[in-house]
Amino acid sequence: MGSVFSPYYARARRKGAADPENHCALNVALYGDGGHRWSMTERGKRWVTRDETRFAVGPSTMRWEDGTLVIDIDEVTVPLPSRLRGQVRLTPSAICSHEVQLDAEGLHVWRPVAPFSRIEVKFEKPGLRWSGIGYHDSNWGAAPLEDSFESWVWSRAAMKNGAAIVYDTVLRDGSNSAFALHIGAEGGVTEMAVPPRREMTTTFWRMARHMRADRAFETVSLLEDSPFYSRTLLKVATEEGSADAFHESLSLKRFRNPVVQMMLPFRMPRRG
């Protein structure tokens, strides 16, 4: 809602006050042997309805139902159109109320709503089904990300009884802000020392990347590679043994580039 990477929302803001409810999207990304599928159709206000427990964007919905977050997906992929239709059910072991301000002014806030959950996934198109560990968090803010940050690195490792999460950001003034948390399955939050910085190889788009880690890690798969963003699946060594981790690198400096803004509609079409 108020999609942070929307070129249409950015264009509207340049003209003055813009309504975030007029720029909403459900982003779905599937990775695996069946191929990479991506959808992120932005929709205008007339396609959106919401209340305390339900959020609908076009034909797709998210709703809380007896303690489970149910996501009904009915989308079309880009750049090659194909149907994405299915359901994800996420059941948290606990709801976490912890919130972190990501900048000194408190304009940007992050909350790990359900950092340790069970998921059941059933897709009709394509025909896929699996279950496993899920994660749900939330970010919101009162200013565009690119106005506050130069870069943003995030990682989340699935532990045996919770999740280890690291944020590492550089603000527009060049100052650095980083924190590390362990969040247990019961929702308890423990602050950890921020691990040392370890450089990662650059991607095809020459994105500079790094990981905050105490021990060795290896890249399992580069899931997304774009001029301003990369998403990577890692295998990290922890005191509990080997763990799967998701890693994101975001360059807001690159995102502000007009050329990058012109490329975004190819991954994010819009229905007004």
Image (cartoon, grey):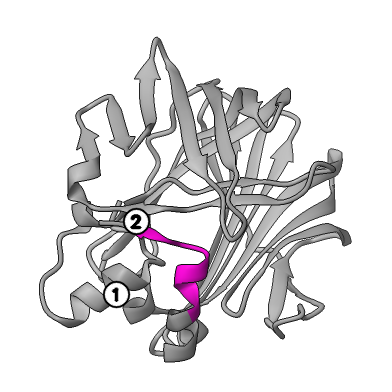
Residue appearing at x 20%, y 82% in the figure: 14
Q: Which mark is residue 109?
A: 2
Question: Label 2 sits on what residue type?
Answer: Val
Q: Quadrant of residue 182?
A: top right
Q: Is residue 176 visible?
A: no
Q: Where is residue 247 drawn, in percent x and y?
A: 68, 59
Q: Where is residue 223 drawn, in percent x and y?
A: 73, 58
Q: Earlier in the sequence, mark 1 or mark 2?
A: 1
Which tag is nearer the camera, tag 1 or tag 2?
1
Read off the residue under disc 1.
Answer: 10
Residue appearing at x 42%, y 15% in the figure: 67
Residue appearing at x 34%, y 56% in the figure: 109
Please tell me whether residue 100 belongs to the stretch shown in magenta. no
Is 29 on the left-hand or right-hand side of 49?
A: right
Q: Nearer the viewer, residue 155 or 50?
A: 50
Which structural element holds mark 1?
helix
Question: Label 1 sits on what residue type?
Answer: Ala
Which structural element holds mark 2?
strand
User: How much space separates mark 1 and mark 2, taking CA atoms?
Assistant: 20 Å
Is 100 drawn above or below residue 91 in the view shown? Answer: below
User: How many residues crowd mark 2 within 10 Å: few (<14), some (14–19), many (20+)?
Assistant: some
Question: Disc count in the image?
Answer: 2
What span is in magenta?
Answer: 263-270
Q: In which quarter of the image is residue 64?
A: top left
Q: Is residue 266 visible?
A: yes
Q: Residue 236 carries which label?
A: none
User: Given the current orientation, which residue lies at the most extreme front position?
Assistant: 81
